[in-house]
Image: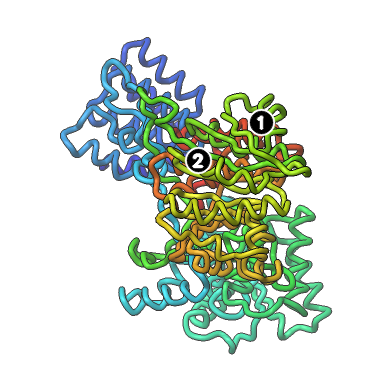
């Protein structure tokens, strides 16, 4: 059989079956006893992944039987699998491994070259390369740049697939339902004898549920359907699939033909029977709160799940979640996993919708790669960060000036200025009230201090303006705001400094108290008047002040609020929170997938300011530097949580983990499997 057929067949049972080891023994008969023993030992001790199996077969079939090469191949791929790379790499390796065999049977393993971690694996073994971070994350490894759509954009993409490419809408529904069924098989092992309960609501989401029911039935599962719409209400594709389910004799409970009391009893009884419940009640088109009978059923599903009754799997988005904001509309299904169609929707990615959806995956439903090219919201991916210059000095890696601190806020200036150094910056200067210097320097001795005159209340005095401006010479970036306080003198200092920094053409990160001050006295001061870029880092409360809105209004549509602020102030805006948003003045939005709830602690945002500042000195564009700084900050939080747990994490813990985050960016094989799955997105 063709080699690629072996690659496709073996992974499904490679590490679960003794047949795999029997095959290894047979194929290694030509090895020396020592080499054969080594290969088999590595295979058994590290539970070789399906990727390792594929590489093993291809290397053998292509004549690459060098024992050292095989040992290195098996060892590396097994280790990669443990870090969560095996399954991911297999996706690209199916084609790259076949290429290996068909291109003059090269002995260099092309799949490793594609991964970007091993090059030139020959008789003497491989030489590990330190690769460019995003080259690993974005180009070499098969991680797509996921776009994210609004509900209206998704509807336009669906229509465009039919109009532009001639893909019938019923085929899109079939693709969605089939991919959903495959997820049931892969994640919940649905098959012969499994008990699957499908809740089919009105519209196309119900139609997707009917497709799932049909495929589960064909696989030998026991399937029942709870019909949450009148049969005559189904139109077009949904009606076609409803009729198919009906003709197949799959049991259907029609809620509308049953008394309410009896219906609730019947639903609860069916839930007790089921192993897996499929939520196909409402899709992304929900426009009003879920209540009444629908609300009762959603709550029944949630009680069943919380009581250990079984798993809940939502189609496209958990029912009750707003597709554009992620808000819960009345009551929402809490799913173990969700498969979203075409592209993730904003409601899939923004909280609380992201949490309600559980494990999130995406199926393209046969959309071509270019179909979403016009969309300008995406899940963040760090760009390529150049390797550090081996002959570099502190000036080579960037210089930053931090204007920060007051008598009541010692931590913020320390965390921000040290965050810059921890993220790889070369020279960090802190301009702060002179009385703070002895205290902060005791824990931040690597920072260079610029003592400033201060007020009686321990804040930076307005007389410090000229000292600060003189200190900006030769700086690559200026940060203003962390822990400054709202002192009147400090307010005057900020109002004088910002316009003059614009004239110098320096990128300026405006954070914390500086944002609060400017929003009170003159928000137009945030607009850069020269060539320097402005990066604003508001949390939701600060963003509300910048837009003169209530927090509730801002939270109602975070993406629109971020875009409004970025356009209004002609600045890059970082909307801090769970899944932080980075918004450009042109309206481009990146949704950050890194981080955890342990980062909700005082001082965390100051570390973020330092990370962004360091990336501004790393040769990236201001927007990409901001995206990468946010990504790195979340990684540092995840690294800290991996060691300490999320409870009790402090900003110092995050600060100390920033170098580990940089290691993960530069070498993704170090990322723990659980986090890797989170980072690559749905």
Frontmost of labels 1 and 2 is 2
At a point 29% along the width and 38% down the height, the residue shown is: 97
Foreground residue among 266 and 382: 382
Disc 1 target residue: 643
User: Number of labelled discs?
Assistant: 2
Cα separation, mark 1 vs mark 2, equals 43 Å
Q: Is residue 6 above or below residue 355?
A: above
Residue at x 75% of width, y 62% of height = 302
Q: Is residue 214 visible?
A: yes
Residue 351: x, y in percent?
A: 64, 59
Q: Which residue is mark 2?
A: 470
x and y percentages locating residue 256 in the rendered image: 71, 84
Asked where in the image residue 88 lies, by quadrant, the reply is top left
Q: Secondary structure at mark 1?
A: helix
List x then y, in percent, for residue 574.
56, 55
The x, y position of residue 284, in whole percent, is 57, 72
Picture disc at residue 76? none
Q: Residue at x 38, y 25 (%)?
A: 392
Q: Is residue 183 above or below residue 419?
A: below
Is residue 12 in view? no
Callout 2 environment at 10 Å: few (<14), some (14 to 19), or many (20+)? few
Q: Nearer the viewer, residue 466 or 305?
A: 466
Name the outermost residue toward the left. 104
Give SS at disc 2: helix
Q: Is residue 359 above or below residue 477?
A: below
């Amino acid at each position: 059989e063709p080699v690629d057929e072996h690659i496709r067949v073996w992974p499904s049972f490679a590490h679960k079956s003794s047949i795999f080891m029997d095959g290894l023994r047979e194929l290694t008969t030509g090895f020396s006893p020592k080499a054969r023993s080594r290969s088999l030992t590595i295979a058994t001790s590290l539970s070789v992944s399906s990727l390792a199996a594929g590489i093993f077969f291809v290397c053998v079939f292509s004549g690459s039987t060098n024992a050292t090469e095989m040992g290195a191949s098996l060892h590396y791929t097994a280790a990669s699998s443990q870090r969560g790379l095996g399954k991911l790499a297999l996706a690209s390796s199916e084609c790259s491994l076949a290429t290996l065999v068909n291109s003059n049977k090269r002995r260099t393993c092309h799949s490793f070259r594609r991964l970007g971690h091993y090059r030139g694996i020959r008789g003497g073994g491989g030489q590990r390369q330190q690769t460019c971070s995003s080259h690993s994350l974005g180009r070499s490894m098969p991680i797509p740049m996921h776009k994210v759509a609004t509900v209206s954009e998704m509807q336009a993409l669906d229509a465009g697939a039919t109009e532009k490419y001639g893909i019938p809408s019923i085929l899109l529904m079939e693709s969605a339902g089939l991919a959903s069924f495959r997820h049931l098989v892969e994640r919940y092992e649905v098959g012969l004898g499994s008990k699957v309960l499908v809740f089919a609501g009105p519209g196309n989401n119900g139609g997707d549920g009917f497709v799932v029911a049909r495929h589960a039935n064909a696989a030998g599962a026991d399937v029942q359907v709870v019909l949450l719409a009148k049969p005559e209400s189904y139109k077009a594709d949904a009606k076609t699939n409803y009729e198919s389910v009906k003709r197949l004799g799959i049991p259907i409970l029609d809620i509308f033909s049953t008394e309410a009391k009896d219906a609730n009893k019947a639903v609860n009884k069916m839930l007790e029977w089921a192993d897996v419940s499929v939520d196909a009640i409402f899709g992304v088109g929900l426009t009003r709160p879920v209540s009444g009978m629908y609300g009762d059923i959603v709550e029944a599903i949630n009680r069943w799940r919380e009581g250990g009754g079984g798993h809940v799997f939502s189609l496209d988005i958990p029912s009750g979640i707003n597709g554009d904001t992620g808000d819960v509309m009345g009551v929402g299904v809490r799913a173990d996993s969700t498969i979203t169609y075409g592209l993730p929707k904003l409601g899939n990615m923004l909280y609380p919708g992201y949490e309600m959806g559980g494990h999130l995956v995406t199926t393209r439903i046969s959309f071509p790669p270019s179909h979403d090219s016009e969309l300008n919201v995406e899940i963040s991916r760090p760009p390529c960060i150049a390797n550090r210059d081996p002959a570099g000095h502190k000036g080579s890696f960037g210089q930053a000036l931090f204007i920060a601190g007051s008598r009541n806020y010692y931590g913020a200036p320390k965390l921000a200025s040290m965050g810059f150094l921890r993220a790889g910056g070369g020279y960090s200067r802190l301009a702060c009230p002179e009385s703070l210097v002895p205290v902060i320097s005791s824990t931040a001795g690597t920072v260079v201090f610029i003592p400033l005159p201060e007020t009686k209340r321990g804040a930076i005095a307005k007389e410090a303006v000229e000292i600060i401006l003189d200190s900006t010479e030769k700086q690559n970036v200026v940060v203003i705001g962390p822990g400054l306080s709202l002192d009147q003198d400090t307010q005057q200092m900020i109002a004088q400094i910002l316009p003059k920094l614009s004239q110098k053409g320096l990128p300026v990160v405006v954070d914390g108290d500086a944002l609060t001050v400017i929003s009170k006295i003159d928000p137009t001061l945030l607009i850069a008047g020269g060539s320097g870029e402005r990066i604003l880092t508001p949390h939701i409360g600060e963003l509300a002040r910048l837009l003169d809105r209530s927090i509730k209004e801002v939270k109602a549509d975070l993406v629109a609020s971020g875009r409004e602020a970025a356009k209004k102030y002609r600045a890059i805006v970082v909307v801090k929170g769970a899944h932080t948003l980075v918004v450009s003045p042109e309206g481009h939005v990146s949704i950050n997938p890194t981080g955890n709830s342990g980062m909700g602690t005082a001082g965390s945002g100051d570390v973020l300011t330092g990370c962004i500042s360091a990336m501004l000195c790393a040769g990236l564009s201001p927007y990409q530097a901001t995206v990468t700084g946010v990504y790195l900050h979340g990684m540092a939080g995840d690294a800290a949580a991996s060691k300490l747990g999320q409870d009790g994490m402090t900003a110092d813990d995050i600060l100390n983990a920033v170098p580990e985050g940089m290691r993960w960016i530069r070498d993704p094989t170090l990322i723990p499997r659980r986090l890797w799955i989170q980072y690559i997105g749905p």
